[in-house]
Image (tube, grey):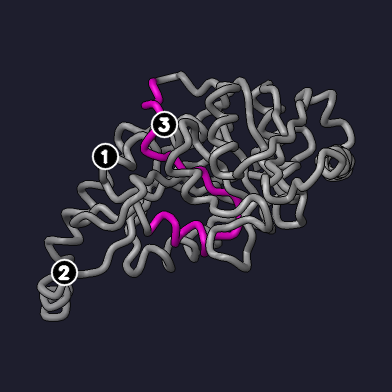
């Protein structure tokens, strides 16, 4: 089983690209293929759907696939044709049911897997679903997810270059478990690693307060990072005062970040605890792909 990083912080057997065939998901497919090739994994292109009333009636009357099902299988095959796998051939899987439910269930059957999603950040448009649905899939998935938002540049063949990774954290338990994943990815790509905490401006009532928070954060980062992280990825630690959503995006822009890592809080809808809340709006606006790590992803 391929591992990412010498310390096996990420074990990865399969990359699952969940597509709705929309333009928003096409770039995500290129990222999924590039990651599969880079790490030598299996590759699956999956689509979840519900039968239309006409297709349901047709399949009830005769034990044959409906035209809807045949069309979707055809579209999956065309998508898979242009996406290389790191190991073997690209597999296609058509899942029947609500994508928010059946895709996470499918992922568990292929564990350890990385799911790759594209999103346009909006609700459904005809059969294009990976807007609000991507958010729902993230909220139900256990493990690591790579989401490619609408502001991420199109990936060209052989251009998966990750030079600088940003790990945004408040060092809460929900965010801290993403630290080994961030270090492992930095090691795998020989990338530098930025570690950022955004202190909300409302929490700073005097200069001494900021100094205490900075010292606490530096100590917390040292505690959650693998002991040899400094030798692996040369982490740079930053504390900003402002609003997490705005300042994370600003850091991505200023530091030319190629990949953002966020730890997800399981008890709120796609939020991280305290100061790093609201992951999905960041994903939608970020100019780089975002890896979200739910508890249980790192070993």
Residue at 82% x, 38% y: name it: 207
Q: Which mark is residue 64?
A: 2
Give the crowd class for mark 1: few <14, some 14-19, many >=20 residues within 10 Å. Answer: some
Above or below — where is 236 with respect to 36? above
Q: CA distance from mark 1 to mark 3?
A: 13 Å
Q: Which residue is mark 3?
A: 152
Q: What segment carries the magenta color? A: 133-156
Res. 147 visible in picture: yes
**In the rendering, at what x and y percent does residue 254 appear?**
57, 22
Res. 225 visible in picture: no
Residue at 31% x, 32% y: name it: 82
Q: Which mark is residue 69?
A: none
What kind of element bears circle 2?
A: loop
**In the rendering, at what x and y percent does residue 110 appear?**
54, 56
Give the crowd class for mark 2: few <14, some 14-19, many >=20 residues within 10 Å. Answer: few
Q: Determine the residue located farthest toward the front in the rendered image.
A: 206
Q: CA distance from mark 3 to mark 2?
A: 41 Å
Q: Are marks 2 and 1 in contact (CB under 8 Å)?
A: no
Residue 215 in which image quadrant: top right
Residue 262 in which image quadrant: top right
Q: Nearer the viewer, mark 1 or mark 3?
A: 3
Left/right of residue 188 with respect to residue 29 in the rendered view: right
Q: Which residue is mark 1?
A: 23
Q: Nearer the viewer, residue 75 or 161?
A: 161
Quadrant containing the N terminus is top right
Q: Nearer the viewer, mark 3 or mark 2?
A: 3
Q: Earlier in the sequence, mark 1 or mark 3?
A: 1
Above or below — where is 173 with respect to 242? below
């Amino acid at each position: 089983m391929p591992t990412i990083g010498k310390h096996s912080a990420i074990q990865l057997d399969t990359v699952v690209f969940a597509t709705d065939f929309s333009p928003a998901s096409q770039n995500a497919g290129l990222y999924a293929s590039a990651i599969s090739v880079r790490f030598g994994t299996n590759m699956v292109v999956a689509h979840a759907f519900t039968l239309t009333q006409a297709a349901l009636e047709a399949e009830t009357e005769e034990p044959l696939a409906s035209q809807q099902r045949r069309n979707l299988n055809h579209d999956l095959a065309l998508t898979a044709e242009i996406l290389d796998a790191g190991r073997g051939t690209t597999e296609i899987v058509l899942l029947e049911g609500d994508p928010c439910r059946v895709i996470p269930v499918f992922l568990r059957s292929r564990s350890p897997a990385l799911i790759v999603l594209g999103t346009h950040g909006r609700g459904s448009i005809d059969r294009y679903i990976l807007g609000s649905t991507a958010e729902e899939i993230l909220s139900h998935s256990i493990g690591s997810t790579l989401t490619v938002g609408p502001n991420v540049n199109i990936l060209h063949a052989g251009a998966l270059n990750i030079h600088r990774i940003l790990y945004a954290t408040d060092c809460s338990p929900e965010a801290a478990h993403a630290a080994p994943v961030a270090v492992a990815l930095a090691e795998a790509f020989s990338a530098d690693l930025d570690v950022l905490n955004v202190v909300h401006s409302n929490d700073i009532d005097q200069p001494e307060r900021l100094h205490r928070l900075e010292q606490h954060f530096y100590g917390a980062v040292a505690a959650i990072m693998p002991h040899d992280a400094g030798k692996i990825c040369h982490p740079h630690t930053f504390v900003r005062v402002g609003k997490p959503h705005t300042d994370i995006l600003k850091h991505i822009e200023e530091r030319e970040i190629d990949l953002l890592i966020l730890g997800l809080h399981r008890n709120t809808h796609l939020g991280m605890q305290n100061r790093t809340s609201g992951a999905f709006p960041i994903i939608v606006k970020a100019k780089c792909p975002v890896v979200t790590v739910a508890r249980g992803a790192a070993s």
